Image (spheres, rainbow, N blue to C red):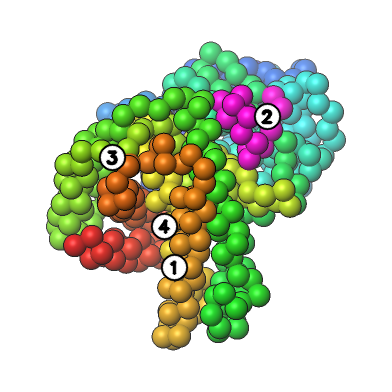
Amino acid sequence: MIAQEALSAALADYLPRQRWFAGSADHAADVTVTSVASLCTTGWPALLQVLVRSRLGGCGGDAATYQVVLGLRPVDSAMVFLEGKPEAVIAELDTDLGHALAYDAPVDPELAVALLHHVAPGEHVERARYLGADQSNTSVVFDERLIMKLFRRLAAGPNPDAEVTRALVAVGFTSVAEPVAEWQGDKGDYAVVNQFLVGGTDGFLLALTSLRDLYGARCRPADAGGDFAFDARRLGTMTAEMHLALARAFGAGPGDAIGWADDMERQLGRVQLGPELEEGARRVYQRLRELDDPGPAIRVHGDYHLGQVMRTDAGWYVLDFEGEPDRPLEERRRPSSPLRDVAGLVRSFHYAPQVALQEWGPDPDEELLELAHAWEQRNGDAFLTGYLSAEGIGAVLPGVEADRRLVQAAFELDKAVYEVGYEQSHRPEWVGIPLAAIHRILEAIR
């Protein structure tokens, strides 16, 4: 339908402009189209699945496989759905049907519905709502009833999000969106369809609402109308239940403190912190290596923060088990301490008040700074109370409290180091948030 040479050239320019692509946005990608498949009947509009191999960091880097689902319409068609979405346009291309505009199909409501029917042929839907959030995959909501996640960078084997969700449902964990359908092929998982959590609210947005209320009222966090502590404690309990379910689903083995510290050292090497902070972090990681009992290792969420949980009237739900996108897949799928996820939530309780302060203005006064710290302390403590009081959670944690605190602190430090690298690449105006946390964690441990 399309000459592969022309398609490869178009995608070499298109891919670096996408949030989910791991290469540099400064130059064209090294792209090879490996397959093109038609997903619907012939004629306009056309829907194609294109798989490409691209080398990271130029010709000498490791290769990754990406999935692009193309929409094709005549160039003179009225395509209102592309308004305000220049990043979705790929190129004008000659095809067997004629001269066409190629674009990212999920933004096209008609083709999104066609894709859903391909993935879940037993489901009847009429309306599609593209979620344009900044994320490593692409999601579309249908009839406010179903949500499809289209995986972009394909894993070598099962996608962790699909794999873990399947396993949790199988052992009776109910705080995940119920799976409806999966799209799989030779390259693994292409997409999943789940029940849409109607009325659900992102945990980070809830935290920001609580903080805006607090900063406006300038009172104790416990006295603010939007006090978050009750929800934080419930979130802690649900998190413990998730970890116990993960242990049932995938098993538990002895913790590998040396391996965890080695992963942390590798992450440290991916970020420019400066010699003083790097040396301080290495000292903490060495203390982790020397622990006699770091606790068990289980499959974990791997990128756990307030933006990965959603509250509905029925309680908290967990989203997106793919792990941190900037870490290697092998590392993301490796069993780890459940305290890694705990550390991620604790870090999130630091991030939220700092982001809310930036919304308030460039120079928050001393009272607001104190309120930010008080909110973080109150809700972090509530979360840990809910987590540690959950029945049976001790079975997946270090047996000695001092060891538990050190393991958690090491993972908090590792998370903050990761955040520095992420913010340097994507949101440099926020990099001061994790840098301040690194200083604080090192000082507390010292």
Q: Would you say 7 lies left or right of 1 here?
A: left
- Amino acid type at mark 1: Gln
Whether residue 52 appears in this view of the structure is: no
Q: Would you say 246 lies left or right of 398 here?
A: right
Looking at the image, do the residues carrying marks 4 and 1 touch, with CB atoms under 8 Å apart? no
How many angstroms separate mark 2 from mark 4 (CA)? Answer: 29 Å
Please state which of residues 154 and 204 is positioned toward the viewer in this rendering: 204
In magenta stretch: residue 176: yes
In magenta stretch: residue 329: no
Q: Looking at the image, is mark 3 or mark 2 earlier in the sequence? A: 2
Whether residue 222 appears in this view of the structure is: yes
Q: Looking at the image, is mark 1 or mark 3 earlier in the sequence? A: 3
- In the rendered image, residue 370, in percent from the top left (x then y), is placed at 43, 80
Q: Quadrant of the N terminus?
A: top right
Q: Residue at x 52, y 46 (%)?
A: 390
How many angstroms separate mark 4 from mark 3 (CA)? Answer: 20 Å
Q: Looking at the image, is mark 4 or mark 1 earlier in the sequence? A: 4
Q: Which numbered mark, 1 or 3, is in the foreground of this view?
A: 3
Q: Which residue is mark 1?
A: 377
Q: Which numbered mark, 4 or 3, is in the foreground of this view?
A: 3
- Amino acid type at mark 2: Pro
Mark 1 lies on a secondary structure that is helix
How many angstroms separate mark 1 from mark 3 (CA)? Answer: 25 Å
| Chain part drawn in magenta | 167-181
Q: Which residue is mark 4?
A: 347
Relative to 335, residue 440 above or below: below
How many angstroms separate mark 2 from mark 1 (CA)? Answer: 36 Å
- Amino acid type at mark 4: Arg
- In the rendered image, residue 306, in percent from the top left (x then y), is placed at 53, 54
Q: Which residue is mark 3?
A: 294
Relative to 265, residue 51 above or below: above
